[in-house]
Amino acid sequence: DTGMFTYDPGFTSTASCESGLTYIDGDEGILLHRGYPIDQLAEQSSFMEVSYLLLRGELPSKAELEEFTRTITRHTMVHEQLTTFYRGFRRDAHPMAIMCGVVGALSAFYHDSTDINDPMQRRIASHRLIAKMPTIAAMAYKYSVGQPFVYPRNDLSYTGNFLNMTFSVPAEEYVVDPVIEDAMDKIFILHADHEQNASTSTVRLAGSSGANPFACIAAGIACLWGPAHGGANEAALNMLREIGTVDRIPEYIARAKNKDDPFRLMGFGHRVYKNYDPRAKVMQKTANEVLTKLGVTDPIFDVARELEQIALNDPYFVEKKLYPNVDFYSGIILSAIGFPTEMFTVLFALARTVGWVAQWNEMISDPAQKIGRPRQLYTGPTQRDYVPVDKR
Ligand code: SDX
């Protein structure tokens, strides 16, 4: 009992690890990063400040934040040879396929200079990953649309730099819209970390073997891609577009309730939250603000809100405690900003890199940590003797 949270012995015995980064109460819909509620961080902090908080454990002073931001900014360029990895992909390659390949390839550039037992080298590797992810993500987008890569600029914020690398073209200056920059930064905060979700557990398991952090993050990206996990934001927007109009919602609600139909409401439900995902609340508010400020009227936002209301009042979903999750509204904002759906999970990976890196550091710096080795319940045949093929 830590005086704040009392562990259920049953939970502790099944917990995969101890961690002080993020606390989730799925029944109450609570999400804290180092004790700070996610809605306060999303409304009052910045992605750089939340990154510092997750990595170091405390909110930074003004000087500490400036120094951290300067360090990250000065690591945003990638080795020029890394650009050749992009040219091996077909133009229509999914950007997440590119992210898996290129981030894994970072190992080839930094493997030899990353002694994970040296705290300073772990910190440098962490900064490199956080700093270079926006550059790599923007390059994946540029490659997919056949536009030239745009280099990072040190005079822009972390998020402004990412938007510029993504949307700027040599033919004309891209002006970072503060409304879009603020919404993007909020989205990054909302995706930064989320306890021991599937992709974070993947990063921890890979890291527990002593693999270099670049390879571990590539493993996390691969896991995040799945539609049951980070891929849900892309799937949720595609679902809303397929529904198209409010009158077609009942057909999809019926499908989601039909056990014989594999269809699920994308952006709904969660392994842990049996209440409203607190991130979804901030996301819905941000979606409303961005669409209003940008003067964008997207009919699928109306479909999303109507679908949410119907599902929240439908006994089936109420009984199964299915609520919108972080992925339900994010796609509406990202689409309004100008991202294609294929980039949605890339943006999730960009933001979650901070959580993955912070969780990896927490694990690696624990001298007691051992290689992960999940156990199993064996359900195969009992022992039997081999039968030569001519006697089978
Ligand atoms: C993320 O773990 C994390 O923290 C992940 C994440 C993070 O930040 O890292 O929060 C990010 O991955 C959010 C989740 C994004 N995925 C989706 O939106 C995809 C759609 N959702 C479902 O696939 C589903 O809800 C899961 C995968 C998220 C959870 O699946 P579970 O474990 O089966 O959910 P559950 O046990 O709570 O389900 C209870 C019941 C089940 O029915 P029964 O077996 O009891 O009959 O509800 C059903 C499920 O079949 N159900 C749904 C549903 N989600 C669950 N039915 C229809 N539509 C849905 N979306």
Image (cartoon, grey):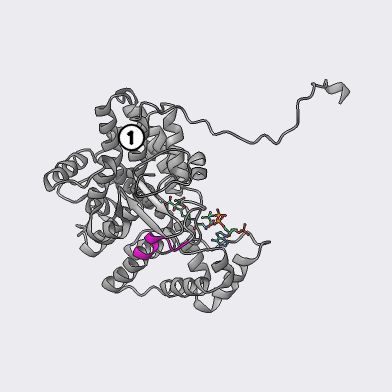
Give the residue type at disc 1: Asn
Q: Is mark 1 within 8 Å of ligand 1?
A: no
Quarter of the image with the N terminus is: top left
Residue 4 coordinates in the image, percent (x, y):
35, 50
Can residue 91 be seen by looking at this rendering? no
Residue 80 highlighted magenta (yes or no): no
Residue drawn at 12 percent across, 48 percent down = 62
The residue that label 1 is drawn on is 361
Residue 29 coordinates in the image, percent (x, y):
41, 60
Q: Which residues are magenta?
A: 275-282
Residue 232 coordinates in the image, percent (x, y):
48, 56
Can residue 47 be seen by looking at this rendering? yes
Q: Residues within 10 Å of mark 1 (few under 14, many from 20)?
A: many
Residue 234 coordinates in the image, percent (x, y):
45, 57
Q: Is residue 316 left or right of residue 271?
A: right
Residue drawn at 29 percent across, 74 percent down = 292
